[in-house]
Amino acid sequence: MITVNDVSLHFSDRKLFDDVNIKFTPGNCYGLIGANGAGKSTFLKVLSGDLQPSTGSVTMGPDERMAVLKQNHYDYE
């Protein structure tokens, strides 16, 4: 299970998201939709730990791990 508690992310004076709270539970599939530039990939980077939130925390269970396939296709050539 991944738990997101009060996560906010700001880039200088721009607030990308604020006080996000969500719990991803085992056995479910989740989708993330939104317009280009809305912050979908950035939110996934926060979930994976590649980017630290301005406030709040992302936690996983002690025996859980996350795998990430990056979008940069040049890394795989």
Image (cartoon, rainbow, N blue to C red):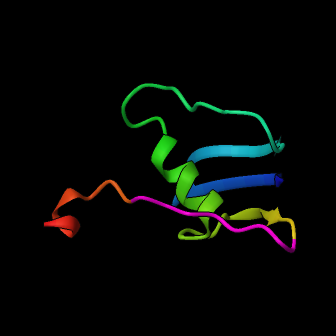
Q: Is residue 75 above or below residue 20?
A: below
Q: Which residue ends up furthest to the front in the rendered image?
A: 27
Instruction: Quarter of the image for the C terminus: give it.
Output: bottom left
Residue 55 visible somewhere in the drawing:
yes
Quarter of the image where one finds residue 36:
top left
Q: Quadrant of residue 47?
A: bottom right
Q: As drawn, is 25 to the left or to the right of 15?
A: right
Q: Is residue 18 left or right of residue 39?
A: right
Whole-percent x, y for residue 4 in the image: 80, 52
Tell me if I can see residue 13 in this picture. Answer: no
Residue found 87% across the figure and 66% down from its top:
61
Residue at the left extreme, as displayed: 77
Query: Which range is magenta?
Result: 62-69
Residue at image position (50%, 52%) is 42
Can you give x and y, in whole percent of width and height, for residue 41 in the image? 46, 48
Residue ID at (53%, 59%): 45
Q: Is residue 19 magenta?
A: no
Q: Give the prevailing secondary structure in the magenta stretch.
A: loop
> What x and y, as percent, mark residue 18?
72, 45
Q: Which of the two residues, 56 or 46, is positioned nearer the viewer here?
A: 46
Residue furthest out toward the bottom: 62
Q: Nearer the viewer, residue 47 or 42?
A: 47
Residue 67 highlighted magenta (yes or no)? yes
- With respect to residue 46, does 51 lie above or below? below
